[in-house]
Amino acid sequence: MNNTADTVTITNNNSGDTVTLPLMRGTKGPDVIDIRRLYAEFGCFTYDPGFTSTASCDSKITYIDGGEGVLLHGGYPIDQLAEKADFLEVCYLLLFGELPNAEEFSRYSESVTRHTMLHDQLASLLKGFRRDAHPMAVMVGVVGALSAFYHDKLDIFDPEQRRMASIRLVAKMPTIAAMAYKYTIGQPFVHPSNSLSYAENFLRMTFAVPAEPYINSPVLSRAMNRIFVLHADHEQNASTSTVRLAGSSQANPYAVISAGISSLWGPAHGGANEAVLKMLEEIGSKDRIEEFLRRAKDKNDPFRLMGFGHRVYKNHDPRARVLKESAEEVLTELGVRDDPLFALAMELEQIALDDDYFIEKKLFPNVDFYSGIILKAMGFPTSMFTVLFAVARTAGWVAQWNEMSGDTGQKIGRPRQLYVGELQRNFVPLDAR
């Protein structure tokens, strides 16, 4: 393969044939070889399991530099957004490409607030699930069912209808999540309140009960807002790629987001913070850390150090520092500053960061390392952790879906394969086999 300034030439070593392909450059990040003509002119596909070296689209929404530990939304660093922005400001940024001014934010946040309620018949649908149904199963079903309630606004080629669907999904997701939680514990549903912020409203719908007044904690609301911001979008991960692939068939937005939730439900994607808690509970005490670090280094031991390292980041996860600060604030607010899991997590982090093995492997704490501790302290069961991830990631999903739907060059997703099965065989009747 030979590079020039704007092209790449590939030679088939068997036939000697060559093909020259364009080299595409983004505003940041690696160059991309445009292989769309490769099969037609060269008779070959690329082979990339997991699509780890394949750019499936161009996008203006999120940029990640895993080597440097950089995450930008519309050019804005994630730590600045998490520290200073309201979650709905970030939703607006992802969807429209700019942070809103005061008037735009007021108009957008009011639109979201006015759509947080669910059609009453959806409550009846939710009550059809088994009482012990996993909240993510409820989310998949109820979000997909939204298309039956808004079937008159499903024209994905109409930008206004796409905008309206995006607002509805962002608005209703925390209501659905809170209802799924209330249903599993047998408490009555709490309707949203238009006087509260997005994070405040979600916490109230989740934890308020009719028998007593609910008192909002600014510290907990701030932590919830940060968690939402930090999980809002993360480029072309598994669930976002699922959203784009499902959306490429021109499916309705509610079915598309339901598909994204299903992908997120996988423990390899959305369940990592729960795995961190289980790991800390397994370690149990500080004097056992060295034992488990030795096990983590042993290739023959199934134990893995959860919450360290990342598929993309080969440096510090920029989201982890913000959550560490939030964990300290939340535990202090709740009077559990001496929480043994948090103390164990901090000790484990410090020892791992000073260990040559983890330094060489670039296994730094990621966003999941502290998020589970925060959510547990706030009172969320582990079954709700991925649900909260889905609430936050809806902002990115609808932004990515909207961007893709407005792309005139978009085609239906159709990956190819390297076939390794049998050659053509003739059918043999059943009695002759």
Image (cartoon, rainbow, N blue to C red):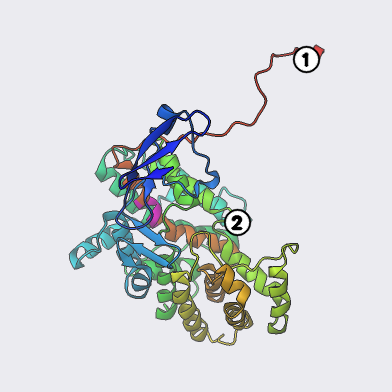
Above/below status of 214 relative to 272: below
Identified at 56% across, 51% down, the residue is 137
Indicate left or right for 31 with 98 as reference: right
**Magenta segment range?**
395-399
Q: Is residue 317 magenta?
A: no
Residue nearer the viewer, 213 or 263: 263
Dot 2 crowding, Cα within 10 Å, few <14, some 14–19, many 20+: few
Q: Which residue is mark 1?
A: 430
Q: Residues within 10 Å of mark 1 (few under 14, many from 20)?
A: few
Total numbered badges shown on the rendered structure: 2
Q: Quadrant of residue 424?
A: top right
From what the image shows, is residue 68 above or below residue 24?
A: below
Left or right of 228 in this view: 385: right
User: Left of 288 or right of it: where is 142?
Assistant: left
Give the residue number, with chain letter if any, for mark 2: 267
Residue depicted at 75% across the width and 62% down the height: 300
Please state if 64 lies on the left or on the right of 238 as rendered.
Answer: left
- The one nearer the camera, 196 or 63, is 63
Instruction: Please tell me which of labels 2 and 1 falls first in the chain.
Output: 2
Measured from the top left, where is residue 308 in percent x and y? 57, 69
